[in-house]
Image (tube, helix red, strand yellow):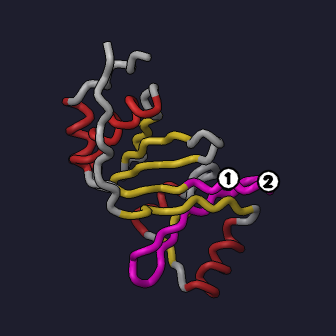
Amino acid sequence: MSMTPTTPPPIRSIDHVHIFVTDRAAAESWYQRVLGFTRIKKLEVWATDDGPLTLQDQGDTVRIALFQEPKESCRSTIALGTKAHEFIAWRDHLAQALRETPKIMDHDLSYSLYFRDPDGNPFEITTHEYEAAKAQLATHTHPAKPTT
């Protein structure tokens, strides 16, 4: 059975960029001093050993997520923002376009889809409309695997 290609749903913004640092406390201080970034209080619960410390600029238009990891080559993740009602459409579109369902993560405050480009560069599509996305995920089944 042949599937008709879908049109990608809208992307509303770049939600945040993952930045891998060797000393998260020092990095937080640097980003605050140099760029004016401050912690997002409601997301501090994520700042565990392996979770991000999320900072934002003064205008709340740019977010960065600091992950403490051993130093290695760059592997920044581009995170694109979307609305809850578009999140399911993105899951379905990516499942068809990539020929596999992207990884879905429930972050307790947001939902994200994770996938990579052909060169292995990581991408994320995220919604912070958590309750609406949770309700939609509960009522929308995963798409069937595309046929080749």
Instruction: Tell me the tag on residue 75.
Output: 1
For residue 5, side relative to residue 29 (left or right): left
Which image quarter: residue 134? top left
Q: Which residue is mark 2?
A: 72
For residue 88, side relative to residue 97 (left or right): left
For residue 72, side relative to residue 3 (left or right): right
- The location of residue 114, given as percent across then percent down, is 49, 41
Q: What's the residue type where badge 1 is placed?
A: Arg
Q: What's the residue type where badge 2 is placed?
A: Glu
The structure residue drawn at horizontal position 31% and vertical position 12%, both measured from the top left corner, is: 1
Q: Considering depth in this image, is 10 or 86 the residue closer to the camera?
A: 10
The structure residue drawn at horizontal position 79% and vertical position 53%, both measured from the top left corner, is: 72
- From the image, give the main secondary structure of the stretch colored magenta: loop
- The location of residue 116, given as percent across then percent down, is 56, 41
| Numbered range of the magenta stretch | 55-77
Relative vertical location of residue 86 with respect to residue 25 in this rendering, above or below = above
- The location of residue 99, given as percent across then percent down, is 45, 26
Q: Considering depth in this image, is 25 or 119 the residue closer to the camera?
A: 119
For residue 61, side relative to residue 1 (left or right): right
Q: Is residue 107 magenta?
A: no
Relative vertical location of residue 110 with respect to residue 96 in this rendering, above or below = below
Instruction: Tell me the tag on residue 112.
Output: none
Q: CA distance from mark 1 to mark 2?
A: 8 Å
